[in-house]
Amino acid sequence: MGIVGAGPAGLILSQLLDRAGIDSVILENRDREYVTERVRAGLLEQATADLLDELGLGERMHREGLVHQGLYLRFAHQTHRIPLSELTGGRSIWIYGQQEVVKDLIEARLAAGQQLHFEVADVSVHDFDGDSPRIEYTHEGERHVVDCDVIAGCDGFHGVCRPAIESALTIHNHEYPFGWLGILATVPPSTDELIYTNHERGFALHTMRSPELSRLYLQCDPHDDITNWSDDRIWEEMHHRFETDDGWQLNEGPIVDKGITPMRSFVVEPMQHGRLYLAGDAAHIVPPTGAKGLNLAVRDVRVLAEALISFYADNDSSLLDAYSATCLRRVWRVQHFSWWMTSMLHLIGDADDFEHRLQLAQLDYVVSSTAAATTLAENYVGLDKV
Ligand code: FAD
Ligand code: PHB
């Protein structure tokens, strides 16, 4: 197996295959420090956390991660709790940084003696229309070839695998007129569970990484430059957006990381062509409001690993043939949920306030109807039947 990309998708796929005795080579164009330091997702569905346990990788997550059984929706300056676990038969979510997951996976890959090459350049994929695909790349100035049975394109949204088959794909793309400004601050979180806020000035989210480290996001112009946002300006805006009528206080602290991310919904169909299979952000992007990107990437590679194991063990390619259709059912469910959360919580900015009144009506329904709250909760903790 040739795997392009050492993000969560590529690393977990390799680990799943290794467990079944299938060798893989992972090629990553960044250096190890970069992939383990970049701040990205932080929320794991129960099923993702369970998989890490099953793979024997849950030890640090249990020690350092936080388990949450609910979340808060804040609107009209009031806070309402959605009891996730109560509404979903006891399921919960984990707060454990993506870069921590990636660190644990890289260590496991290297400890198992698997081939994982960082800082490779000019990766290209070839002959996936036949039975003997290959990947070419440059490492330390020399050109190399990996001959493999199958290629997994786990190289994220800006990778090379999807463009290599783009003429065979249908692309669905929706860009939102806003982005998220995210910060990491060394200050204890001002909340025990995540707060998603709909405010007249725009969306805000209070999440965390540990009892000492807060992560917060603000809706912003996706084209804005982060240098326009001094730390003082960020905190001032946070105070506005999180304000409540009950005296709740937001703790401030030193900001150690900040950046702006644009938001989009994106899906390619099918997620496969010949012997090249796309997984994770290479095939789809969701806006982060539903906290689904990482979790969806993990679901893809579970399906792909199972199909590859059947292909190698029984020479049966039926699961591989069905890979895209199997994944896309969940992908579209999650696309809808992520779009719904995004639409309900962000400032749309119409002239007559109509959209905002609809959002408030919807939020009021979600916090006052058990059926509506359950819809949010079961999607948020992760549906198993799709
Ligand atoms: P990636 O993590 O992008 O990994 C792809 C890898 O391929 C990278 O290491 C890249 O360097 C490498 N690569 C790229 N091109 C090449 C090449 N040509 N050759 C070799 N290697 C290459 N998701 C959640 O589930 N929960 C959240 O709470 C959440 N919050 C988020 C917050 C933010 C601000 C952002 C930006 C994203 C968030 N996400 C969240 C989404 C999540 O981070 C992604 O969906 C996840 O990283 C997808 O994993 P992946 O392995 O598919 O892709
Ligand atoms: C995060 O912790 O970074 C996070 C949590 C929930 C989201 C998005 C990001 O919806």
Image (tube, rainbow, N blue to C red):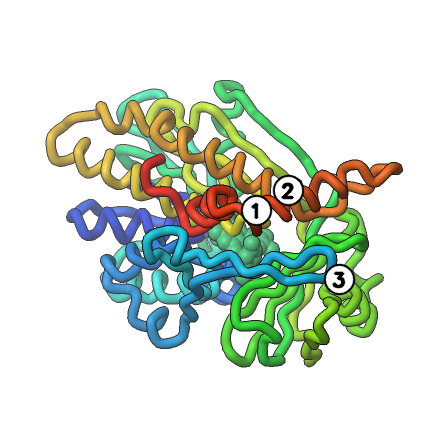
Kind of residue at disc 1: Val
Disc 3 secondary structure class: helix
Q: Residue at x 48, y 56 (%)?
A: 119
Q: Helix, strand, or loop for circle 1?
A: helix
Can you give x and y, in whole percent of width and height, for residue 291 in the image?
A: 52, 51
* Residue at 64 percent of width and 65 percent of height: 216
Residue 345 x/y as whole percent: 67, 48
* Secondary structure of residue under mark 2: helix
The residue most toward the right is 351
Residue 71, percent across and down? 52, 60
Residue that label 2 marks = 362
Marking on residue 366: 1
Image disc number at residue 241: 3
Residues 193 and 113: in front is: 193
- At horizontal 73% and vertical 67% (from top left) the residue drawn is 244
Q: Quadrant of ligand 2?
A: bottom right
Looking at the image, do the residues carrying marks 1 and 2 touch, with CB atoms under 8 Å apart? yes
User: Does the image show residue 329?
Assistant: yes
